[in-house]
Image (tube, rainbow, N blue to C red):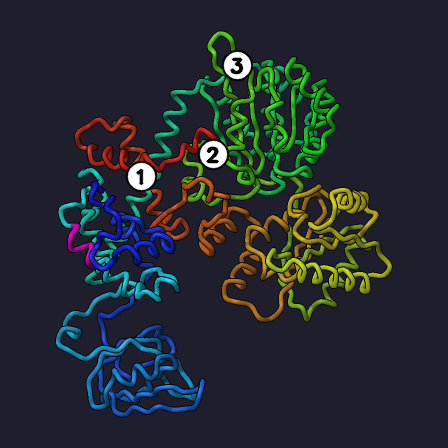
Amino acid sequence: MTGFFDTRIEFLKGVGPAKAELLNKELQIFTFGNLIQHYPFRYEDRTKFHRIRDVSNSLAYIQLKGRIIRINMMGQGRKKRLVALFADGTGEIELIWFKGAQWMLQKIRAGVDYVVFGKPTLFNRKFNIAHPEIDLLTEANIDHAFLQPIYPSTEKLKVRYLDSKGISKLQKNLITITGQHIRESLSDRILDGHKLIPKKTALENIHFPKDQHILKKAQYRLKFEEFFYLQLRLIKLKLTRIEKFKGQVFNSTNILTEFYNNHLPFELTNAQKKVIREIYRDLKSGKQMNRLIQGDVGSGKTIVSFICMLVVIGNDAQVALMAPTEILADQHYKGLKPFADELDLEIAILKGSSKKSERKIIAEKLESGSLNILIGTHALIEDAVKFNNLGLAIIDEQHRFGVAQRAKLWRKNHTSAASGQSIIPHILVMTATPIPRTLAMTLYGDLDISIIDELPAGRKEIKTVHKYDSHRLEVFGFIRKQIVYGRQVYVVYPLIEESEKLDLKHLTDGFEAIKRAFPEYQIGILHGKMKAAAKDFEMSRFVRNETQIMVATTVIEVGVDVPNATVMVIENSERFGLAQLHQLRGRVGRSVHQSYCILMTNYKLTRESRLRINTMVSTNNGFDIAEADLKLRGPGDLMGTQQSGILDLLIADLGKDSKILEIARQAAQTVLEDDPNLEKEENFPIKQQVKSQRKSSVNWSRIS
């Protein structure tokens, strides 16, 4: 786009200062460029006319041409409405106005021909259209059938006549003056190779398409371009990072070999071995590693990360592991300490609640280099924490940390006197939130990705069933049977922030109901409003099997492992998202015993809720669930990406356009392999576009 598109929006015909201010505030439209990229979210088909006799419930919107036969004002007071009987020779339909009835009465006439557009509704076995769009029938509106763009707008804008139609008029004013200003932003080779229409044609037809065929071509072209530049940026950042940042070389495997031969408590899965090989290759390459490990709950990421720690420690460097909560940090520490002790390695934990005396000892040991592994929460990134030689920084559930917080881990080493620079640690990011391929390629396109897609031997798949509230006695019978076998049970209630009081009551009522149903057993309760000490007390009782049933909110989504807990009952499961349901289910199934997840709902389920429940029942695969989740609710803030600015897609959709994303990524890869600095003449349009975008880009890869 040229400087023309930086023109402030008030200078467009039909806008002016007052409307410009509203467009700024309501839609973040400040310039001509912002407006032309304010794309329609759907189109109404005005290319064909329906006949009244063919109207059915299956038609979302219809366009009719015919004559108003009769007009009546009906009802009294607030029930007053205008009703016009409309006929086209094949049948009759009522047009109704509840609002603005008096104004419409002045506007329409009986005996006159009109074009009507609206949504048909069946009432008392007759179809009507409430608040239709209505225009006089002319040769123009019969001959110029078209697809009507529908734009996002707001209530405040509608008051100032900037509803979808008003925005459409502004787009028309803009398109008529943009002609020579729309610059091609892709090379001829890409346009020809991918059969893409020119940028100018695409922009004109995204707003005012002649037909469905050209609309699809315009959408494809603009989606391809959006993905192409996003991927180009990510791939370029990755190449720059690999060139610029050297990594410490870690190739000694002495401690690792000892652990493998003498202390490894179980056989690793093939998926775990593959990931360890990938990480070891990075650690000895001399390039700084930036790798993401994705693995479902219980797939064994922690032992993989420990084995990688041993490579680093065996080369006289230190390791930091940062977790988002104290519970999770404790879990990592308790899980790894026995292994560290067997190998005579020094391991410590640093949390917000750590005492001053503990912090002092940790700081001294860190700086001297005698502390090998430090596990902690955000406390790790405090300025007082300095390493002698941090070789590897591991970040668990990294989307729970802000960009700036993660970046601080980079600066944790003493500055070396020789170079005047601090040595940058290798970065390993872990997540138990399975990320769909398309989202991973976009969010982490600059990271290398390793996937642990296999559960440890002996783990049985969790059986998931859907039960309605009316089956509660049957569910209680099943719970009792499991407790008799010596197992434990979670019962989880939703807690939705907007109405915490209401939901806490819901939880308390549930707790009382469970106590009445199981008077002979010990029952615990856990929710976010409890003090940390009370939470720990309840959880530790459950771990020791002193309570058989834990009634909780989603605070147990990430928490202490309880291998003996084999039943997860999720109440009102329709109120949870797919990812959350999958995380909750992952709290059971952590031993050799058969585990169960019971999804409770009432009978009234939306289509989307039913789809979520069915997905959970049909698969345990976190990646399949993540794909379904992405399709259902879009990327949104799935990975805490609002802070990164990387998913501000204007037209492309990660859930629906994965094929276009893969094609665009391959195209970007090919361009950079052939011409890394975009110096060839054929890539001049691409280089220009990159320059114009650079102002707003975020250096995501530097931070992982």
Residue 229, numbered label: 1
How far apart are labels 3 and 2 at the CA level?
A: 30 Å
Identify the residue at horizontal 19%, vertical 70% (top origin): 145
In terms of sequence position, does the residue under pointer 1 or pointer 2 come before the other?
1
Q: Point out which mark residue 449 bears.
A: 2
Q: Residues within 10 Å of mark 3 (few under 14, many from 20)?
A: some
Residue type highlighted by circle 2: Ile
Amino acid type at circle 3 is: Thr
**Looking at the rendered structure, which numbered label has been put on residue 682?**
none
In magenta, the rendered stretch is 172-178
Q: Amino acid at mark 1?
A: Tyr
Q: Is residue 540 above or below residue 625?
A: above
Q: Position of residue 514 (x, y in %)?
A: 78, 61
Image depth: mark 3 or mark 2 in front:
3
SS of the residue at dot 1?
A: helix
Q: Which residue is mark 3?
A: 415
- Determine the CA span between mark 1 and mark 2: 21 Å
Q: Left of 189 or right of it: where is 296? A: right
Q: Does 559 lie within the magenta span?
A: no
Residue 538: tell me if it is visible. yes
Task: Tell me the quarter of the picture where residue 358 sits.
Answer: top right
Q: Position of residue 442 (x, y in %)?
A: 41, 40
